[in-house]
Image: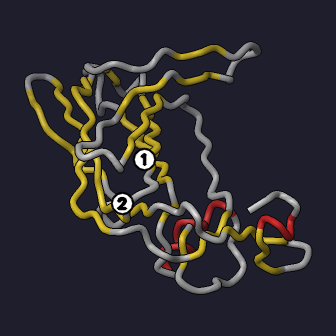
Amino acid sequence: YLVDRTPPPPPEAADARGWAAARGAVDGGETLVRVSVQGRGAAAVVLQALHVRVVERGAPLPWAAYRMDDGCGGAVTPRRFEVDLDRPRPVARALDGYDASGQEGRTLPAVSFPYAVSAAEPGELLVSAGTAACDCRWYLELEWSSEGRRGTVRIGDEDGAPFRTSGAKGRPVYGYDSVGRAWITGEESGQGG
């Protein structure tokens, strides 16, 4: 996260998003968005397309970066997408995934739309949106159809606002030393900065 002042110690991983929001923090360099999708009944829901809409661009924030793990687990193996927010018209590009749920992991081919889900066969999309050159506010749009109906779902942050991601290149990076109970630079931790 990029923060404009030294923050207090980080919370448990599950509480990281709320902790960051309370401090006005912004995702630094990358935002991970996990979208769970499934039908309500026996009928399939066909996901038609995933769009990226950038609503505002500015210069990257000059704030320091504070590193923490905000966790990312789930029972469903996600279908992965990558977004380059620095492009004039960013697109969600499908990537191969990996399923490690069995004894032997297997590569999951990149999903292509249309893609069907149902109540019995839910799906999960993991979108990694990154930037080096802007402070971007953006959201996703997921087009769907089912039983003759069509719609578009706008996907933003927990409050429905656009996501915000700012380039973090060249910023000081701090990690939390839980033994010394202090934020330290990469050099102090021996991990580089």
Q: Is residue 36 left or right of residue 9?
A: left
Q: Is residue 125 left or right of residue 8?
A: left
Asked whether the residues under the numbered discs 2 and 1 touch, taking CB atoms below 8 Å apart as contact, a structural biologist would say yes
Q: Residue at x 52, y 71 (%)?
A: 18
Residue 86 in the image, given as x and y percentages of width and height = 35, 50
- Amino acid type, label 1: Ala
Query: Residue furthest toward the left?
Result: 148
Q: Residue at x 66, y 64 (%)?
A: 67
Q: Is residue 155 left or right of residue 6?
A: left
Q: Residue at x 33, y 67 (%)?
A: 159
- Amino acid type, label 2: Phe
Task: Classify mark 1: helix, strand or loop.
Answer: strand
Q: Nearer the viewer, mark 2 or mark 1?
A: 1
User: Which of these two is toward me, 76 or 168?
Assistant: 168
Q: Residue at x 37, y 65 (%)?
A: 135
The mark found on residue 163 in the picture is 2
User: Which of these two is toward me, 139 or 60?
Assistant: 60
Residue 87 in the image, given as x and y percentages of width and height = 31, 45
Question: What is the CA distance from the residue labelled 2 to the residue labelled 1?
Answer: 10 Å
Q: Which residue is mark 1?
A: 129
Count of numbered tags: 2
Specify the quadrant that holds the C terminus. bottom right
